[in-house]
C-alpha cells in the first residue's frame, strides 16, 4: 500500500498532545484488494480505535465489526463471514518495535507511530472461522455434485485408484504380502 493509503490508519503516540484520541475508519473492498490477505477477497469492516494517554504508557482499544468475503472450503463459492473482535493493549514507547506480552507492545520511540491496518488485518484473520464453509444448505449444489462424482470414496473396494481390479487373497496375482497380512487382520483371520 502507498504511504497515502496507510496514513489514515497511523496513530502518532509521540506527537499526541490530547489526553484521548478517537479514530474511526472503514476497510472496504479497495483496502482488501491491496492488503496481503489471500483468503479475503472483499468486505466492509468498521474500525473504531480509542487511545488514552497515561503517565508512562497509552491504552489502545480497537474494535472491528463487519463482514468479509471468503471462499467456501467445500464448494469454492464466496460467502460473507461475519467479523467481530476487540483488542485492549498497553502501548509503550521503547527502543524498538516489540511485543512485550499479549497485552503490551512497544513502539519505536524515534518513529513513535503505529500502523493500525496491520493490527486490524491480524484481528480480522483471527476472527475468521476455522472451517470456511457456507451455512448448511447454502453451498453450490452443482459443485458438490461434481466433487462427489470425482471423489475417491466412490471407487469400489475391488478397484484401486488407477482403475485396475484385483482379486481375493486366494488368487495367484502378485500382491505385496504385507497387504495380505493387513487384510487378514481386517477380516479377523
Image: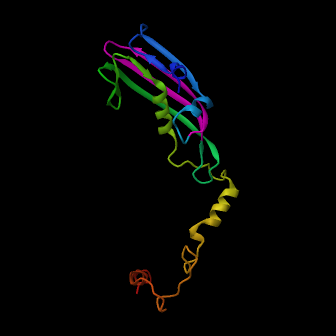
Residue under the image location 69 percent in, 56 percent down: 141
Residue situated furthest front in the rendering:
2
Count of numbered labels shown in the rendering: 0
Q: Report whether 130 appears left or right of 71.
A: left
Residue 79 point in image, percent of width and height = 63, 43
Residue 48 point in image, percent of width and height = 52, 22
Residue under the image location 60 percent in, 46 percent down: 71
70 versus 32 height, above or below: below
Q: Give the range drawn in magenta.
A: 40-69
Asked if residue 132 lies in the magenta stretch, the reply is: no
Colour scheme: rainbow
Q: Which of 149 and 136 is in front in this view?
A: 149
171 versus 156 height, above or below: below
Check the picture and name the quadrant holding the C terminus: bottom left
The main secondary structure of the magenta stretch is: strand
Q: Report whether 105 appears left or right of 122.
A: left
Residue situated furthest top in the rendering:
17
Amino acid at each position: 500500500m502507498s504511504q497515502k493509503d496507510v496514513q489514515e490508519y497511523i496513530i502518532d503516540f509521540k506527537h499526541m498532545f490530547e489526553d484521548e484520541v478517537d479514530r474511526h475508519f472503514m476497510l472496504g473492498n479497495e483496502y482488501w484488494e491491496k492488503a496481503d490477505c489471500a483468503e479475503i477477497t472483499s468486505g466492509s469492516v468498521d474500525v473504531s480505535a480509542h487511545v488514552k494517554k497515561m503517565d508512562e504508557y497509552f491504552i489502545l482499544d480497537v474494535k472491528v465489526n463487519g463482514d468479509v468475503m471468503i471462499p467456501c472450503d467445500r464448494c469454492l463459492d464466496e460467502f460473507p463471514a461475519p467479523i467481530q473482535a476487540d483488542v485492549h493493549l498497553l502501548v509503550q514507547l521503547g527502543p524498538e518495535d516489540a511485543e512485550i506480552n499479549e497485552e503490551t507492545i512497544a513502539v519505536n520511540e524515534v518513529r513513535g507511530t503505529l500502523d493500525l491496518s496491520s493490527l486490524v488485518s491480524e484481528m480480522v484473520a483471527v476472527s475468521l472461522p476455522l472451517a470456511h464453509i457456507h451455512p448448511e444448505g447454502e453451498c453450490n449444489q452443482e459443485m458438490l455434485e461434481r466433487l462427489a462424482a470425482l471423489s475417491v470414496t466412490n471407487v469400489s473396494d475391488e478397484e484401486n485408484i488407477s482403475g485396475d481390479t484385483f482379486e481375493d487373497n486366494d488368487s495367484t496375482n502378485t500382491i505385496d504380502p504385507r497387504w495380505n497380512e493387513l487384510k487378514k487382520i481386517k477380516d479377523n483371520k
